[in-house]
Amino acid sequence: MNAASNQPKTYDLAVIGAGVNGAGIAMDAAGRGLKTALIEMDDLGAATSSNSSKLIHGGLRYLEHYEFRLVKEALAERESLLRNSPHIMWPLRFVLPHRPHLRPAWMIRIGLFLYDNLAKRETLRASEGVRFGTNSDLKPEITRGFKYSDGWVDDARLVVNCALAAQQQGADILPRTKVVSARRAKGIWQVELVDQVSGEHRCIQSRALVNAAGPWVSKLFNEALEQRAPKEIRMVKGSHMVVPKIYDHDEAYILQNEDNRIVFVIPYEDDYSLIGTTDVDYTGDPKRATISDEEVDYLLGVVNSHFKKQLTPADMVWSYSGVRPLMDDEGGSAQKASRDYTFEVDAPTGEAPLLSVFGGKITTYRKLAEAATNAICKHFPKAGAPWTKTATMPGGDFSDHQSLNRELQSRYPWLPQDVRKRYVRTYGTLTHTLLDGISSPEEMGEHFGATLYACEVDYLIKHEWATTAEDVLWRRTKQGLRLGEAQQQQLEGHIALQLKQALCSEEAH
């Protein structure tokens, strides 16, 4: 081993936190020519970014809080995102039942007019008024409502796609790696890392640093950066529950409640309905956030007051909770806390810059990443121009689901229809990489249940940084909804064996 191999690797930019904002910044920066590392203490998108309402939306209710700039920016972003990632994002029509005692029709019409016109709409349909007949899923007393358009996103896969795009541009992706300290020395950041699996410590150097740690953004200042956070965030828990689907069409519902909040009911994974979200102030470890009995009762209460089909807590097949790091405006209710974002740049003369991200929402991640990267690139005069607004995400180079489905059917006629359909909306054209060298169902390897085969699991380990059954079942595929405990243990054993073989192969070389 030569002396040079003991030298810490030097980057232009180290991004701490691989939620959607951190992964988006790493992608943007790497594409502008900065040598970038993306560092995450857990799996990619394991916290807030995989526990959202799965919506690309302007935020209709934010209009009531007069956040017009945020709504306008988010509405404009919808079109770019839907165009760039057709596999994991698609338009979604929303039904808004009218409850006259909550909001008058004229107020909703004004809000929807603004929603339709604050930003240019190219693909999404305009809003309209509707009447509900006797066949409606809603209770008979709800006779009128409105429809408008927004978008759906597979949030966890969006984070993985950003990481894949960053890697394609030369970035190093370091999941399950914790930053234990970062300090400035001689104009550069000295960053100490610890591998969360092996416990091994190592150091890297970086000319600039981004703190995109989401709910941990302020904590990182105290623990690793050893300085006071310039801003505090407000941690707000949003919980969701999944139930067997309560209606048979592909539109979502946005339900008004007496407390002025709204609850979404969204078609989910073909056979389910996703219900959410709550807004509850939260203290403690964001990793440990779970739905409370009070939140279950709250969500079911809103749904049961609208739908003919009545639900009980026993109908819940899965739940998840995410902690949103919102801007702390010191006071007010959790639901009124702003979804806007800001970032702070700390760049003393002659010292390596630090940029910290506070707040944000998934719809504006690309815009946030672009603005943050612009600020970082002031310190890198040779960096390239912004590029992500029109960039196709990995797997997104096709026109629509139907056309890609036909192409896959023609090329892989042996592939089961339900598997093919899921691959279209999970991997897009990356399906070709997944199925490379496979020519029959038998060659797909062990069948773990539902539509999950060994070839997909091995692809996720090799190409998408999956190392546990949870990574595969709940973030990469959502097949956890369909696999029993014995099947999940079988999967865990397969993953452990694959990782052991990969390690042995690495050591042999």
Image (cartoon, rainbow, N blue to C red):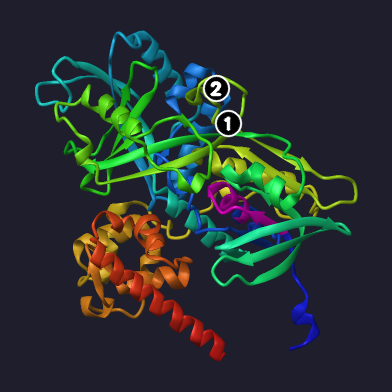
Q: Residues within 10 Å of mark 2 (few under 14, many from 20)?
A: some
Please give left or right for residue 78 compared with residue 36 in the image.
left
Residue at point 22%, 22% (across, down)? 305
Give the vertical position of 134 relative to 53 (above or below): above
Name the secondary structure under disc 1.
Answer: loop
Pointers 2 and 1 in contact (C-beta within 8 Å): yes
The part of the image, by quadrant, that contains residue 457 is bottom left
Q: Which x, y percent locates residue 280?
A: 45, 30
332 is within the stretch colored magenta: no
Q: Which x, y percent locates residue 157?
A: 43, 54
Residue 409 seen in the figure: no
Q: Which residue is situated farthest in the left direction here?
A: 134
Name the secondary structure under disc 2.
Answer: loop
Q: Which x, y percent locates residue 454?
A: 31, 73
Residue 279 seen in the figure: yes
Mark 1 lies on residue: 340
- How many circles with numbers are drawn on the protein? 2
- Quarter of the picture containing the C terminus is bottom right
Of marks 2 and 1, which one's residue comes earlier in the chain? 2
Q: CA distance from mark 2 to mark 1?
A: 8 Å
Q: Which residues are magenta?
A: 13-26
Please give left or right for residue 188 compared with residue 81 in the image.
right
Any mark on residue 67, and which?
Answer: 2
Residue at point 9%, 22% (across, down)? 134
* Closest to the observer, 456 or 76: 456
Q: Amino acid at mark 1?
A: Asp
Q: Which x, y percent locates residue 464?
A: 46, 65
Any mark on residue 237, and which?
Answer: none
* Closest to the observer, 99 or 34: 99
24 is within the stretch colored magenta: yes
Q: Which residue is situated farthest in the bottom direction here?
A: 508
